[in-house]
Structures are given as C-alpha cells and as structure tokens.
Amino acid sequence: MLSRRGFLGAGSAALVLGLDLAGSRWVTAAEAESVPSFHRLPPLDGELVLDDDARTAVATDLGNLVHRKPRAVLRPGSTADIAAVVRFCAEHGVSVATRGQAHTTNGQGLSAGLLIENRHRARVLSVNDTSAVVESGITWKELTKTTFARTDRRTPPTLTAYTGLSVGGTLSVGGIGGLVGGLRSGLQVDHVREVEVVTGTGAVERCSATRKPDLFHAVLGGLGQCGVITEVTLDLVPAKENARTYALEYRDTAVFARDLRTLVERPGVDHVYAELFPPGTDATYKIYATAFFDRTPPDDATLTRDLGTTPQVTDAGYLDYVFTIDNAIDELSETMGWDRLLKPWYDIWLPGSTFERYLAEVVPTLTPRDIGPYGAGLIYPQRRSLATRPFPRLPKPDATGWAFVLDINTVASQAGPDPAFVEEMLARNARMFARARDAFGATLYPIGSVPFTARDWRLQYGERWQAFLDAKRRYDPKGVLTPGPGIFA
C-alpha cells in the first residue's frame, strides 16, 4: 500500500510508487528502477491497497451478478487523496469508481481500474437544528443515530428503507423515502444544500443550486458520472419520539389501489409503503401506513376510516421503526448468507396515472420464483411536486400528482453461481421494463438489474440527455468516472 507516512519513510521494497504506463500495472519501489515507463504517484494521507484479498472483496456488489476486480483500491485519508488519485487516473486513462456500501445489483459501482472505498470517509463534521455536514461515506443509520440523540431530536427528512447505505451512494442514485419521506418530503437529493465534489479532472469543487448549479444537478442522482461526492450539507427536521403503523392486507388490486391513494392523501398519515406478493399467497398486497407522534397517539378511527380492510396496529420508538429493515437484513446476513445470494432486482418509476393498470397486468404473472424466499415486492409513493431535482429521471408529472416506485427484488433461494437463473431474470427484467416504458411511461430507478443499451439511456434521460452529456464532457472529459452503468460508452 502507499501512504504518506510510508512514502516519506521509504523503507519498503513492496511500497507502491506509481504506474507502469506501458504495462498498465502498479509499480513497487523494488521494481521502479527497472521500469522505463514508470510514472510516480503523489504521496497520500490514506493508502493504496493492491493485495488480492482487498481487491477481491470489492469485485462485486449486492447483486453478485457482475464481477470486476479493480487493479487497486484507494482507502482515502482526505479529499486531497481522492483528488490526487482521480487526477492521476485521468491523466493515464485508468477508470475510477466509488464504493459506498455497494447496494446496487448490476455492477454499477465496479471498476477494473481503481476503486475508491468511501467508507473510510465517514465522519459527522457538524450538526445544528436545521442541517448536518457529513463526509459522504457515513451511513444514514449512523447519521440518524447522531441527530436523533440531540436534545432537540432531529432526523433527515427522507430515509431509505434500509439505512445502512452511504450518504454519497444514495445521493448518486436519488434516495427514495422507504420508511420516512415521500408524502411530506422529496427524495434525499431534494434535501441537499451543498456538496463538495472531486470532478473527473481531479478538481475539488463546492457547488449548490446557486453555485456551479450544472455540476450540483449533475452529481445528485447522476450515477457518479461527473464527480465523486466527498462532503454533503443536508437538511434536518424535528423528529417525533414514536411511530404508529397500520398494516392492511388485500387480495384485490382495485381495492388496494383505492386505499393506497386514500392514505397518501389523508391528513395525519406521515408515510405509506406497500408490499406485493405472488398470486396464491395469503395476501397479494399489504399496505403500511405510519403516523409519527410524541406522547399523544393518533386517532385510529380517523386515520383508518372508510378503508377496505381492518388494520393491525403496532407502535414503536422512532429509531426502532426506522431501523426495522436493517434489523431484518442483519438477521438474513447472519442466518441465510444474504450477502452471497444472487439478486437480479427490477426497480422502476411509474406515473400515478398508469400505476394501477401496470399492477393489474404484471402481478398476476409473478410466481414465487420471481421474488424468491428472501426477496420482496415493494411499492413506494412519491408526491411528484416534491421531487425537484433533474435527476434521477422520474416520469413526467400527471394529473394524479404522484409517482410510484415498484421494486421486484428477486433473490435466489441459495448462494452460489446459477447462470441459467441470472439469464432468465435479466431477460425478464429487460422484457418487463420495455413494456413498462413503452406502454405505461415508466423510467428506470437505476439500482437494479435491467440491461440497458446506449439507446435505452438516451430514452431514459429524454430531453435532459444533452445537458447530462454536456456536464459529462465538461467535468469528466477523459470519461474515467464510474464506467459500470455504460451510460456514455
């Protein structure tokens, strides 16, 4: 590994000093004199790791579908480290990707060149009653624990269902409101005030909606194409102490959709999401509607009036509620080898006007194999007017005022390679998405495993394609950043 301390000490023959430009490999101190095309790296505060175990550990993501081992792994000790290494890689044509918690499922954050392990940059830098400044490798779980522990109890306004994701990672894809947000707040990118970014040229920039807005909008939801997010200033809002959740089960799509639309508009309901199940199970859909409160619980009769089924009611402390999915995933990781299972996920945005028709078409076709024993079908509503950033690309607004994320989070029944299963599910995803886009106005939520061509990406971004392309050319002119999605290939 290469670090500033080791570099200055210059005592190890195994120390990495730079890159062999002809052989396209990293060069140690013992080799440097014999390599005529050697180019020296700058000294670093962190470390550059080359051992096989470290590189193998970051060669795939949550999906386990794509494997791409990097030639080196940067564990940055500072933003300056990231800037120096990105600049070096851009000069010499080495691809760079950034890894938070690697919860994409189709190799989006992998690189055969250099991979930046952002989890080593995970501090809360400051917190006040309206905002927090954090390094981008911190997880939403750790941030929320920190802000909720304040005497004035604060929380990010939007939280993903699984909070063990990095701030920089979810801001790169959008960040949907899994257990907090969606009805009363926008996506996580809508609550960013300022970001520090290392561009593809190695420049360090601070940007906001009024300062370098083209870069600001290109990195939020921009899939890592124009910069590495290193530091973020985020909104905070007051947090209630408790959460009351009403769980309602349905077999009929029309009744389910009617109650879902009722609950997302109902005063006093703070969050709604739903599960879907293959036909033949006890329920096809299950709605979870939550109201947050301090000491006085909500009025159950008022919140659940005129619904098509009787709810089950449960109470939890705010943090227990927010970390519900984390606890479930942790248990699966310990008992079922969750991290090693194949996960060819299907994740899309649907317009509110076509959402019910799409469910009526797709849900009857699902089988237990389409979800798997450890998978889930999930639906997340988003009030369209609150999603204000250019990216991620949502469907066009319609008269309903809503858009819905549909996740068919397929998980294999056992760990290990299964090429036939992967081929089947990727073909299913491509077929389903083409139909959803062409007939129902869907767009991709790009954490899943939907094979995309260059034409698909242009269709995805529509009238915003040229602005995105211009930003890519301006801030990553050598095209080294985040090759995994293949957007500009």
Image (cartoon, rainbow, N blue to C red):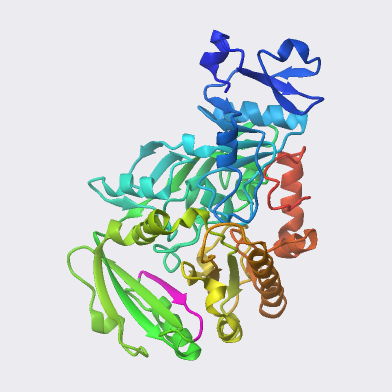
In the rendered structure, does residue 278 fall within the stretch colored magenta?
Answer: yes
Q: Position of residue 372 (x, y in %)?
A: 51, 71
In the rendered structure, does residue 485 fall within the stretch colored magenta?
Answer: no
Q: Position of residue 50 (x, y in %)?
A: 61, 29
Query: In the shown orientation, is residue 426 left or right of residue 276?
Result: right
Name the residue nearer the viewer: 415 or 23: 415
- Residue at 73% x, 52% y is 486
Q: Is residue 172 above or below residue 368?
A: above
Q: Is residue 167 above or below residue 457?
A: above
Q: Position of residue 194 (x, y in %)?
A: 51, 43
In this orientation, does residue 404 appear?
no
Q: Toward which corner of the image does residue 351 lie, by quadrant?
A: bottom right
Q: Is residue 378 above or below residue 240?
A: below
What residue span does the magenta drawing correspond to? 270-279
- Residue at 53% x, 65% y is 411
Q: Toward which corner of the image does residue 301 lie, by quadrant?
A: bottom left
Name the residue nearer the viewer: 83 or 420: 420
In this orientation, does residue 100 appear?
yes
